Amino acid sequence: MAEETKVRHTLSEQAARQLANTTKTPPQWDGITPRWLVSFLPWVPVEAGTYRVNRVKETKVEIAGGDVECSPRDGKDLPETFVDYEEKPREYTLNAVTTVLDVQTRVSDLYAHPMDQIREQLRLIIEKVKEKQEEELVNNAEYGLLRHVAPSMRLKTRKGPPTPDDMDELISKVWKEPAFFLAHPRAIAAFGRECTRRGVPPPTAALFGSQFLTWRGLPLVPCDKVHVAGKPGEKSGKTSILLLRTGEKKQGVVGLFQPGIPGEVTPSLSVRFMGINHKAIASYLISLYCSAAILTEDAIGALEDVEVGHYHEYA
């Protein structure tokens, strides 16, 4: 028997939706991170894209060796000394994180409401550029923080997982007014497990409107650019935890930028229209100029071989 055809007495929802306006979100991208390193670093403006770090020449003569005295006796000649500088100081040159955005003008003309296509494309591209900026601040071969920790400022974990003892040892390396730890979120979670296991869960502190775990009063700042070495999807893996002192006055780590560049939309970030070609494609140049400098070797230390896949069983 043929099924009876249902008779509708009202307009269907699907048909009605054709006349309704839909509330839309801007394009969402899960690759956007808080980029805390950029927020925690102090930034120093430079001229001509170059920053020279002048350092005192290292000598084997200690200050206590006689070139400075306390309360010299009457009639004794005063000590004579001077401070020598390195003759070839290191210069940091700003690097450009850059790309070109192409937009078909037909698309930007016809589909500009309620959201401007060019504006949304630029917003997402700028986010990608800023993510790349933080990646380079950590891992760049010329100025990346992780790559330029002095050998004397590196230490390894005692047993693999990051323990309170390991973190205290790292603090003993960067003991002159350290500012913050920098670590992958999994490394911070691994440290939290070790603290919980020992009955000393790390306290939290509110900074920049967010909560951070702390150790000895120093925030543990999450950054996924401090990579975990291992196969994707595996729980095990090794990484590093950095501890930084920051600021020029403290002879620490600083970020570098150049203000006032052409087409600047935020400090050291520019967006410039490059024109429209014969295929009706409009092009925009996005550039971000940045670098980082470690003013003295003891401004940054690294805890290496940090195992992030160790878990405990609780009864």
Image (cartoon, helix red, strand yellow):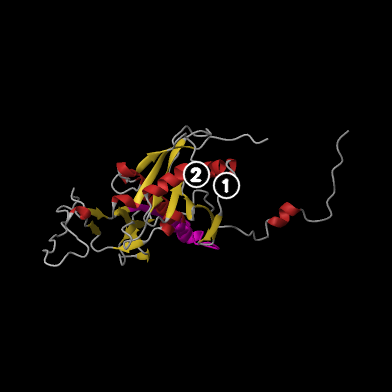
Labelled disc at residue 200: 1
Q: Position of residue 128 (x, y in %)?
A: 43, 51
Figure quadrant of the N terminus: top right
Question: Front-most of 217 and 300?
Answer: 217
Q: Is residue 17 visible?
A: yes
Q: Is residue 262 magenta?
A: no
Labelled disc at residue 164: 2
Figure quadrant of the C terminus: top right
Q: Amino acid at mark 1?
A: Val
Whichever of labels 1 and 2 marks the residue nearer the N terminus, that label is 2
For the residues bearing labels 1 and 2, Cβ distance under 8 angstroms: yes
Instruction: Characterize the local packing of mark 1: few (<14), some (14-19) or many (20 or more) Cα atoms within 10 angstroms.
Output: few
Q: Position of residue 143 (x, y in %)?
A: 30, 49
- Give the distance between the C-alpha atoms of the residues marked 1 and 2, in whole angstroms: 9 Å
Q: Position of residue 167 (x, y in %)?
A: 45, 45
- Label 1's element? loop
Question: Front-most of 57 and 118?
Answer: 57
Q: Is residue 90 visible?
A: no
Q: Amino acid at mark 2?
A: Pro
Q: In which image quadrant can residue 82 be found?
A: bottom left
* Magenta stretch, residue numbers: 97-123
- Marks counted in the figure total 2
- Residue furthest to the front in view is 74
- Label 2's element? helix
